[in-house]
Amino acid sequence: MNFDYDLFVIGGGSGGVRAARIAAGEHGAKVGLAEESRMGGTCVIRGCVPKKLMIFASTATMMADEMRGYGWCDADAHHFDWTMFRAKLDSELKRLEMAYTTNAERAGVEIHHQRAKLADHHTVELADGTRFTAKHILIAVGGRPARIGIPGEELGLVSDDLFLLDKLPHRALLIGGGFIACEFATILNGLGVQTVQAYRGDAVLRGFDLEAREMATQQLSDIGVDLRLGLSPTRLDKTDGGVAVSFDDGSNEEFDAVFFATGRDPYTGDLGLENTEVRLKKNGAIEVDEWSQTSVPSIFAVGDVTDRVNLTPVAIREGHAFADTVFGNNARKVSHDIVASAVYLRPAELGTVGLTEEQARERGPVDVYSAVFRPMRSMFAGANTRSLMKLLVDPETDKVLGCHIFGPEAGEMIQLAAIPITMGATKADFDATMAVHPTAAEELVTMRHPSRRHPQGDE
Ligand SMILES: Cc1cc2nc3c(=O)[nH]c(=O)nc-3n(C[C@H](O)[C@H](O)[C@H](O)COP(=O)(O)OP(=O)(O)OC[C@H]3O[C@@H](n4cnc5c(N)ncnc54)[C@H](O)[C@@H]3O)c2cc1C
Ligand SMILES: NC(=O)c1ccc[n+]([C@@H]2O[C@H](COP(=O)([O-])OP(=O)(O)OC[C@H]3O[C@@H](n4cnc5c(N)ncnc54)[C@H](O)[C@@H]3O)[C@@H](O)[C@H]2O)c1
């Protein structure tokens, strides 16, 4: 059978663009791609990139505080100009969107700037009714912000909206305690917004190492976020001035803006999946095997829509491996076992790779090397901030099972720590590494004795 394309990709985000570029540019496949919004997807347009730029913008007051401690007596962040920042942000995102488009086109990908749906196992239909057949179809449609099902929730905003605000709210509520809620609380607070964060649990960033979570929780309060634990909203009502929020403790409060940062759903609705035999997981994510192949042999899926590890580098790696496997005669699987990540808080970030202490204890015996200290930079300035460097070691094999860093630039540090840990390094390998002095990271190679041992794991 003749097809219009060898590959049709639905979604021009991290996973879809990488797969399309590699299949067309490196393996000579004829590739079509549909994007309903802006090329680059969540990470570039409404995620990692604008978020990180806002994190940078949000540090001015902290930097001024620190520099006053170093003798710059008049250091002051003064006034933040949101309008100017937004204009710069918009043009940077346009530049990146253009780069994504031209790089894909240069590789030979034909881009259709429309929504696409599946019509059958080899056919996609665009919003204007055009149909294309393809030997293979890749679903890379990502996810969308989820709300929580309470009355009036449509009055609230989601993460996408932060990057489009005409002006900053005076007083904002963030709901949630995950990646987005904590990063956005850090941003809004740093930009001068009175920020309340309501989280239903007792320490933010569930799933991360508890010792690090507790430090992140403390830091949010220390920087001025009004963090309210064990609290959930129950309804939202419109008021003259903004939005009134009722909480499950019976309280009621008004905000200029309310953001739901309560997870993301796979974007599989209205995608024509009913015309196929593609199987979904309970939460609507597409079920795939280790080759990113769905239950239909001609249809594959990568990235957030498969709800494996929902991070940009993972989506990219999955897209690349798919293209090499199917079009490059180079079968490659992606291991999701060890995936480093960082939460971009301020002043300390949280970087993590491998098992948490809690997971390591469940697995068996573990030695915990944990150094909590006041870094020289902030201590000299008079701040009471604390950093954490932590290694979890299997006492039988000496293998490093996990590393958790809470401190300035922890994201940069964990990227490097992830290399030896992915390679299977032992504590002896870390110890054999000469320290770089004076740094905070040297703690990783100078911790001589375990801070605690869990000899029997959790048994
Ligand atoms: C606020 C925020 C901050 C984040 N920060 C980080 C971070 O710091 N580091 C990190 O690693 N990850 C971060 N992430 C996660 C990261 O953005 C995602 O894991 C990544 O973008 C997933 O890529 P993807 O290709 O699966 O999907 P996406 O990037 O979401 O791309 C999907 C694309 O498909 C398009 N699309 C959807 N349906 C259709 C259709 N039917 N037809 C045509 N086009 C369609 C969408 O418009 C979108 O462009 C963040 C996410 C958010 C929301
Ligand atoms: N730095 C990064 O790498 C980064 C940054 C942002 C987002 N991301 C990715 O985006 C994903 C989505 O981020 P997120 O923060 O929205 O999700 P998340 O899963 O990290 O956090 C969701 C939060 O919402 C809360 N919540 C869920 N349902 C609720 C309910 N009914 N009532 C009250 N609270 C509720 C949860 O308790 C949790 O705290 C992340 O899991 C991550 O994969 C990564």
Image (tube, rainbow, N blue to C red):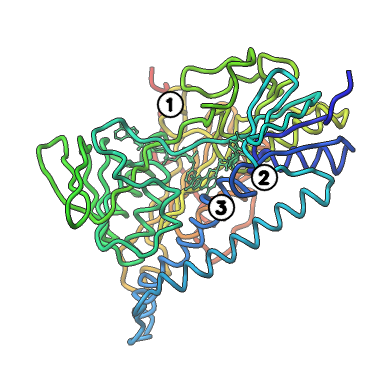
Determine crowd level at label 2: few under 14, some 14-19, many 20+ residues with C-alpha closer than 10 A.
some
Q: Quadrant of residue 330?
A: top right
Left or right, 429 with respect to 240, comes to: right
Determine crowd level at label 3: few under 14, some 14-19, many 20+ residues with C-alpha closer than 10 A.
many
Work out whether residue 185 or residue 453 is closer to the camera in this orientation and state it.
185
Q: Is the C-beta separation of discs 3 and 2 under 8 Å?
A: no
The residue mark sitting in front, 3 or 1, is: 3
Q: Amino acid at mark 3?
A: Ile
- Determine which residue is flagged by label 3: 45
- Determine which residue is flagged by label 2: 113
Q: Residue at x 53, y 44 (%)?
A: 341
Left or right, 268 with respect to 238, comes to: right
Q: Position of residue 367 (x, y in %)?
A: 46, 34
Q: Quadrant of the N terminus?
A: top right
Determine crowd level at label 1: few under 14, some 14-19, many 20+ residues with C-alpha closer than 10 A.
many
Q: Amino acid at mark 2?
A: His
Q: Quadrant of the C terminus?
A: top left
